[in-house]
Image (cartoon, helix red, strand yellow):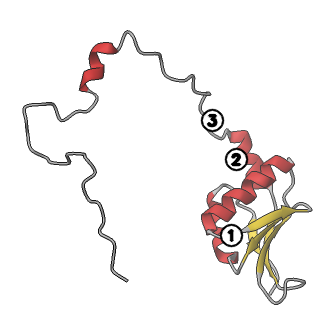
Amino acid sequence: MAKKKKNRGSGFDFSTGNDGGSDNPFAALSGLSGQLPGGPDLPPAEEEPTEKDDDDRSRQVLRVFLDRKQRGGKEATIVRGFEGDEEVLKQLGKTLKTRCGVGGSVKDGEIIIQGNKRDKVVNLLQEMGYRNTKKSGG
């Protein structure tokens, strides 16, 4: 069976020739600034962590250990000992999963990260201000 010929003529001129026009595609809009609607109202930026937040984090006693039980022989990194709001725990779990580049979940007050990421999780938690974080178990 013969190959079909692709239609390469899209009707657009992609040449970079200078025909005296402006290179800025938005140049025509500069005269319409009074007629265009304003931008969206953005929510206020998130506040920087306060000293109280840092103090709460440094008081947390978090233990990070490796678990293979009930997982079909697969390893999982578990973070236990978090005391605080469930939403903060979920956000922390999401951040750890994203930074480690793996999946996981937050269940029963624990953060479960797929794979052996114990060293990386301990380092990340300490960088986030959880100073009293240590490896636990074998």
Mark 1: which secondary structure?
helix
Q: Residue at x 22, y 33 (%)?
A: 24
Give the Cα separation between the discs numbered 3 and 1.
Answer: 25 Å
User: Which residue occupies the extreme bottom position in the image?
Assistant: 73
Number of the label disc, if any, that sits on residue 122? 1
User: Can see residue 4?
Assistant: yes
- How many numbered markers are drawn? 3
Task: Tell me, yes or no, whether the two marked residues, 3 and 1, touch with CB atoms within 8 Å.
Answer: no
Give the Cα separation between the discs numbered 1 and 2.
Answer: 17 Å
- In the rendered view of the protein, which quadrant contains the N terminus? bottom left
Q: Which residue is mark 2?
A: 54
User: Can see residue 125?
Assistant: no
Mark 3: which secondary structure?
loop
Q: Is residue 117 left or right of residue 109?
A: left
Q: Is residue 50 left or right of residue 6?
A: right
Locate residue 128, reporting x and y percent: 65, 56
Q: Which residue is mark 3?
A: 46
Dot 3 alpha-carbon crowd within 10 angstroms: few under 14, some 14 to 19, many 20 or more: few
Q: Amino acid at mark 3?
A: Glu
Q: Nearer the viewer, mark 3 or mark 1?
A: 3
- N-terminal of the pair, mark 3 or mark 1, is 3
Dot 2 alpha-carbon crowd within 10 angstroms: few under 14, some 14 to 19, many 20 or more: some
Dot 1 alpha-carbon crowd within 10 angstroms: few under 14, some 14 to 19, many 20 or more: many
